[in-house]
Amino acid sequence: MQPSCIIVYICPSQISSVLLDIVLFVLSLSVLIYASDKFIGAAESIGLCFGVSPFIIGVTIVAFGTSLPELATSIASVYSGNSQIVIGNVIGSNITNILLVLGLTAFVGRDILLDFDVMDVDMPLLLVSAFLLFFVISDFIVSIFESILLLCCLSLFLYNSIGSGRDDDVKKTSVSKLTYLTVLIAAVFVFIGAKYTITAISNISQTMGIGEDVIALTAVALGTSLPEVMVSITAARRGKHAIAVGNVLGSNIFNTYAVTGIPALLGTIVIPSDTINFSAPFMIFVTVIFAFMCMSRKISRWEGVTLLILYAFFLGETFQRGI
């Protein structure tokens, strides 16, 4: 077999387009960073006002807010006839959340200290969601019944989290109406920032001749996970490790149940064969690693580096399989 190479020619007009997309990427990313910082501060204040623990704030309020870009992107892809992006976006985002978000959080924050037992309820729920997603897509179709099942699981998760989220030891504080308004406005700008970041990354990737399934698992997943990256790193720098870990846990559960379940009610979801062969099993693998790391109630900086190395492997393997 003769060795082959890929030569990509980019004309001057394409270069101008790429430069514009780079400018769009920088601007939208700046909006995303600023809005994420405001969102996490206001969301925590509201949660504390109701006596909710920081971990539950991260696993519900913050997680849902940072998962909005995944949901919006998946719904849009179904209506535009590119539904293969949905599962790639979900699985790619879940992998990115654990390997990149948690890895960067542990590296920047040096150590992530868990002052709660995540293995009690929340981690088992995350593991169940990962295996359930693989079971649902294993026949290459997400049926109406399966989408309803996923949404029922999401409802049970929210009921359990909110029901057990009150903490009498948390000092309650009062918040103004401006705080509630800040959450709404910040969430909108997180969505806008992520949306245009995705647009820029996808345009650049398409110009370079990369397949849509690869874009979904990498560029789109990375773009939609940027809110989680910014929120978790911001939380880690503030010493709010519970919100950082809860954000990853909650976001992955929201992605699996809501971002798969809701679009499946709106149209047929195409599932690429390589999803079953590689990306879905790899998602389960990294979820199990996440669980093992949390058993000691500490994720060290070197464990964060290990997660980043695994993310680099995932990107390399995905591009090798898709190009």
Image: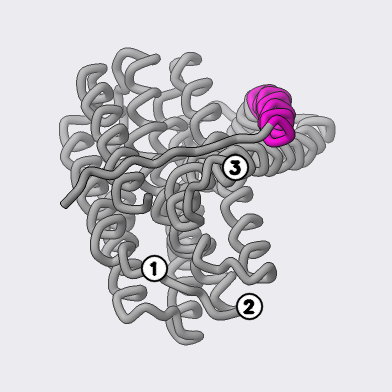
Q: Amino acid at mark 2?
A: Leu
Q: Quick check: marks 2 and 1 in contact, CB under 8 Å?
A: no
Q: Residue 35, can we see it?
A: no
Residues rendered magenta in the picture:
12-35
Q: Which mark is residue 207?
A: 3
Residue that badge 1 annotates:
272
* Residues at marks 2 and 1, CA–CA distance in whole angstroms: 19 Å
In the image, what residue occupies the spot 51% across and 36% down?
A: 228
| Mark 2 lies on residue | 266
Q: Earlier in the sequence, mark 2 or mark 3?
A: 3
The amino acid on which the numbered mark 1 sits, given as a three-letter code, is: Pro
Relative to 79, does residue 127 appear above or below in the rendering? above
Residue type at numbered disc 3: Thr
Q: Main secondary structure of the magenta part?
A: helix
Residue at 46%, 84% in the rendered image: 143
The residue closer to the viewer here, 165 or 229, is 229
